[in-house]
Image: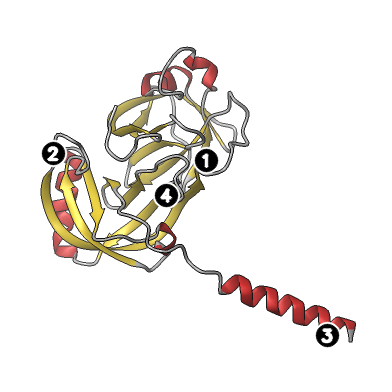
Amino acid sequence: MRIKFFLALVALGVSMWAAAPVQAACGKHGFWVFGGDRIFLSHKPLYGSACHGKQLVLEVVLTDSSKLVTLKNAMTAGEVTFGPTGDFSLQTLTVGSTVKGAFSKGNFEDDDQSATPLFQGTIQVKKVLVERSLLETPKSSPGALSGFLLKSGSTHYLLNSLDRSRDLDQVVEIKPKPGQSMVEVGDDAHPVQLPGRQFLAGKKPNTLTAMDSETAGFTSSDGKKVHFSTTRVIFRASSSDGFKNSL
């Protein structure tokens, strides 16, 4: 009897967990777009916001493949952003979900309104690569700093893991310095350890610049140390004002 009662409680708990409500549509969201053969979206976070306080990096596909060449050309030429249509919750961005919106050349949320429309389109989420809450108190030590690598074709991207207010939300294209080889990167985000924040005494925002990262290199999860050169800054913005203000 006790066993049956315990199993009933477990079943009830699973049922209640499965039925947990998804956060209601809470606002409009913006994403940086980068990549090549693989298309990545990186959410513009706002630290401490219940609606926008999440670092979220997705691999997506365009449902209309005829627009792929236009998007690739734009990503190669400069900054591209994606603004979904209407309000929604980031929790709905799961594998297989679709979102309609507008792609723009430049940052469509910049105050100077310099961005130009590219096209309207629908994306489908292929993979959730990174999902980190920016609501909780950081658990890492003050000097710790980590990141991750993504790969599209032969191009490698280095991203910072956001941990606290004023962390630098950035994506840079990198290549190993002469005599160095890149670590093996698969289809998932590959974690790396970056130099600590002690490199940043007096600097603002409180994380590494691309040049600081190059100076010290990064250490892969398999222990390999790689010194690299930045070939291109895709975007750079503080997580405390990631809605509008690029640095």
Please give the residue where the numbered disc 2 appears in the rendered image: 113
- Mark 4–mark 1 Cα distance, whole angstroms, equals 15 Å
Checking the image for residue 22, the label placed there is: none
Circle 4: element type: strand
Please give the residue where the numbered disc 1 appears in the rendered image: 191
Relative depth, front residue between 183 and 126: 126
| Quadrant in the rendering for residue 220 | top right
Q: Amino acid at mark 2?
A: Gln
Q: Amino acid at mark 1?
A: Pro
Q: Earlier in the sequence, mark 4 or mark 1?
A: 4
Q: Amino acid at mark 4?
A: Leu
| Quadrant in the rendering for residue 16 | bottom right
Q: Earlier in the sequence, mark 3 or mark 4?
A: 3
Count of marks overlaid on the render = 4
Relative depth, front residue between 35 and 197: 197
Q: Earlier in the sequence, mark 1 or mark 3?
A: 3
- Mark 2–mark 1 Cα distance, whole angstroms, equals 35 Å
Please give the residue where the numbered disc 4 appears in the rendered image: 56
* Residue at image point 33% right, 50% down: 40
* Residue at image point 82% right, 78% down: 6
Q: Is residue 137 above or below residue 66?
A: above
Please give the residue where the numbered disc 3 appears in the rendered image: 4
Mark 2 crowdedness (10 Å alpha carbons): few <14, some 14-19, many ≥20: few
- Mark 2–mark 4 Cα distance, whole angstroms, equals 25 Å
Q: Amino acid at mark 3?
A: Lys
